[in-house]
Image: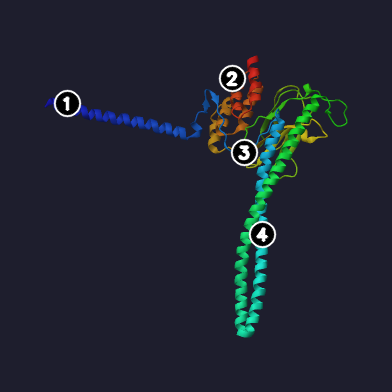
């Protein structure tokens, strides 16, 4: 009897203990889930102790452009792709709109005029024999009904068929012709201008007799930007770009707003005395971006003032998107020297590069920061900049 009571108490105690353990375990899981769901409490995302850049739109069009090697093939491929896409879209839209508008207008006008004239003439002629009232009423009713029905059906069918056929044919022909001509002309002109510079026949500037030698011309220029449009939470961001060698003349910076007749801002860049990463701070020029607009910015070296198609340039796109409240809280709770990790994780490329770049400028011998910038730049397919940074790390 005593043995039976002992086992009963043991089972009850075991049940209570199991219940308490399950409660504590579930509470721990719930707390972890809340912490994971709250961006303000998240630790920055790293992979192998390196920052990770989360591209906001991974499969959008590539908008970054570098200047340098393979300019002919790049010009041809980009000319073809842009020519085809623009030619097809414009050809189809214009063909459809014009075909529909012309088909409808012609179909309705011809249908109504023919229906009314035939209906009235037949109604009048038949009305003499059958009666003026019936002839006129039937003539008008049949003329209007047949005119409208035939006008609409013929207008729509002819408008659609002609619009599609003309849109496709014009889009393909114009896309191919423009893509080939622009791609070849730009690629060949840039390639030939580089060869001409190597031969010492490209003028430094208008009215000057001095010529450029191959050693004076950098072989690569690129914005330090993501391939797709990069985001910034700063209306006056800092933009960074890379030059593979010294340039004795000025370069030119410009930033364009869509559908604007003139650049939003343009200026000259001097002091390009060596290979390196250069910065331009829009706040110092009192330039602010509007939210939700995709701006395109350029850094240009003019090789031949008389042949601007040979310009040596890099470009990228940027969009100002104010940081949401959760990201602001994360940034507030993160030390200044680690904020680039949070920005990269949230998809704000320009803020991440600016933050880590400012720290490297203040501490150029910090290999850890440089290795983190290498990790970020390698994720956006800029191998020449990766090689440049690794060369500095190895040298130190």
The mark nearer the N terminus, 4 or 3, is 3
SS state under label 1: helix
The Cα atoms of the two marked residues, 4 and 3, are separated by 32 Å
Q: Nearer the viewer, mark 1 or mark 3?
A: 3
Q: 10 Å neighbourhood of mark 4: few (<14), some, or many (≥20)?
A: some
The mark nearer the N terminus, 4 or 1, is 1
User: Is 344 in front, or is 87?
Assistant: 87
Looking at the picture, does residue 166 appear above or below residue 126? Answer: above
Q: How is the image coloured?
A: rainbow
Q: Residue at x 65, y 49 (%)?
A: 168
Whether residue 15 is visible: yes
Quadrant of the frame with the C terminus: top right
Residue 114 is situated, as x and y percent measured from the top left of the image, at 66, 71
SS state under label 3: loop
Q: 10 Å neighbourhood of mark 1: few (<14), some, or many (≥20)?
A: few
Q: Which mark is residue 368?
A: 2
User: Is 62 in front, or is 258?
Assistant: 62
The mark nearer the N terminus, 2 or 3, is 3
Q: Residue at x 28, y 29 (%)?
A: 18
Q: Are marks 4 and 3 in contact (CB under 8 Å)?
A: no
Q: Which mark is residue 101?
A: 4
Q: Nearer the viewer, mark 2 or mark 3?
A: 3
The mark nearer the N terminus, 2 or 1, is 1
User: For residue 5, which quarter of the picture?
Assistant: top left
């Amino acid at each position: 009897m005593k043995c039976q009571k002992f086992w009963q108490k043991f089972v009850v105690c075991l049940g209570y203990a199991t219940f308490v353990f399950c409660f504590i375990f579930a509470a721990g899981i719930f707390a972890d889930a809340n912490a994971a769901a709250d961006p303000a409490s998240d630790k920055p995302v790293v992979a192998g102790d390196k920052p990770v850049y989360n591209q906001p739109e991974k499969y959008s069009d590539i908008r970054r452009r570098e200047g340098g090697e393979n300019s002919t093939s790049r010009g041809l491929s980009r000319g073809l792709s842009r020519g085809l896409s623009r030619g097809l879209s414009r050809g189809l839209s214009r063909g459809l709109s014009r075909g529909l508008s012309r088909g409808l207008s012609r179909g309705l006008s011809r249908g109504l005029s023919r229906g009314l004239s035939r209906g009235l003439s037949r109604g009048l002629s038949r009305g003499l024999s059958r009666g003026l009232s019936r002839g006129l009423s039937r003539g008008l009713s049949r003329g209007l009904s047949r005119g409208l029905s035939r006008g609409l059906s013929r207008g729509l069918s002819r408008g659609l068929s002609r619009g599609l056929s003309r849109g496709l044919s014009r889009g393909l022909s114009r896309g191919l012709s423009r893509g080939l001509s622009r791609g070849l002309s730009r690629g060949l002109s840039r390639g030939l201008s580089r060869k001409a510079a190597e031969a010492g026949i490209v003028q430094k500037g208008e009215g000057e007799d001095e010529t450029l030698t191959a050693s004076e011309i950098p072989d690569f220029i690129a914005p330090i930007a993501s391939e797709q449009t990069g985001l910034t939470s700063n209306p006056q961001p800092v933009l960074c770009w890379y030059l593979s060698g010294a340039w004795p003349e000025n370069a030119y910076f410009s930033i364009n707003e869509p559908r604007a007749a003139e650049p939003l801002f343009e200026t000259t860049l001097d002091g390009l005395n060596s290979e390196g990463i250069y910065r331009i701070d829009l706040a110092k020029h009192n330039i602010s971006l509007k939210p939700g607009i995709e701006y395109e910015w350029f850094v240009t070296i003019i090789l031949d003032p008389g042949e601007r198609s040979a310009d040596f340039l890099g470009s990228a796109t940027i969009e100002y998107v104010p940081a949401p409240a959760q990201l602001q809280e994360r940034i507030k709770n993160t030390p200044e020297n680690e904020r680039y990790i949070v920005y990269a994780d949230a998809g704000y490329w320009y803020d991440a590069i600016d933050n880590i770049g400012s720290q490297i400028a203040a501490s150029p011998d910090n290999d850890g920061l440089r290795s983190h910038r290498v990790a970020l730049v390698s994720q956006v397919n800029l191998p020449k900049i990766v090689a440049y940074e690794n060369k500095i790390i190895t040298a130190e």
